[in-house]
Image: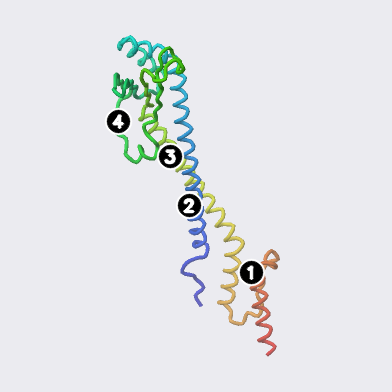
Amino acid sequence: MNTQVQRSLTLKSMIVFFGITLLSLALFLAIQFSYLIEQRKQDYLDQLSNAVVQIQKPLTDALLSSDLSEAKRLLISLKTSGIMGNAIVTVDNATVMNLSFATPKPIPEWATYFVGIPVEMTVPLYAYGNAVLQAKPQGYLTLQVDPNRVYRFALNTLALMTTTYLLLVLIIAIAMTWCVSRMIVRPLRKMAIELQANDQVNQLVVSEYHHDDELGLLAKGYNRQRKQQNSD
């Protein structure tokens, strides 16, 4: 009699465990990826904020005196931070100066949407560097982080995390499947082979480990029925 099965319970359980683990870790991956991106973007903004403090007052003075060459020089000094993308100065909703410090490269729209590009901050420029002395600022300075830098960080982080977690999913799925196969599938397979190989099996024997679980209950029920049939 043929004792082969068309689809092994081990394979079925492995597929189920792999799917559940993949979905769970995919959710965790998305949360952690979002956290890492936001943390890195905040680090960039903190660097820009620390850099702009040094030029905020001189830049306002340059705008008040209409010295655009000095204003340009001050903005170029921000390039030393290494993360500058664009610097835009606006006065009365009009763009006075727009400097680009990064070579523009094409970035996919999905990355722009999901990563949140551009990463920028806007700083008001008050006369004398004091907001109390004048309610309306002289202008605004908008600083943008190099979008290529943000995109590359997001892409590298996503690739590293995806590779790591796919490997982790595979390891967990194999480990859980091995445990299920060891504790459930093998005893069931042994019972199935024994029943198909011999029609006169009067007693199913399971290991002591399964005497108080579902497999032990199954064996006890079968043995009780065979005992009743033999007594009749």
Asked if labels 4 and 1 touch by Cβ distance under 8 angstroms, the answer is no
Residue type at mark 4 is Lys
Give the alpha-carbon distance from disc 2 to disc 3, as whole Å: 16 Å
What's the amino acid at mark 1? Leu
Q: Which residue is mark 3?
A: 158
Please tell me which residue lies in front, 116 or 134.
134
Which residue in the protein does label 1 denote? 215
What residue is shown at x 32% (from left), y 39% (from top)? 109
**Mark 2 / mark 4, whichever is N-terminal:** 2
Separation (CA) of disc 3 from disc 1: 44 Å
Query: Could you say where residue 136 lies in the image, as x and y percent from the top left?
Result: 39, 20
In screen coordinates, is 229 left or right of 146?
right
Q: Which residue is mark 2?
A: 23
Mark 3 and mark 4 lie on one chain; the one further toward the N terminus is 4
Nearer the observer: mark 3 or 1; the answer is: 3
Mark 1: give few (<14), some (14-19) or many (20+) Cα within 10 Å: some
Would you name the residue on which mark 4 appears? Answer: 105
**For marks 1 and 4 on the same chain, the one whose residue lies earlier in the sequence:** 4
Q: Residue 64 sits in which quadrant? A: top left
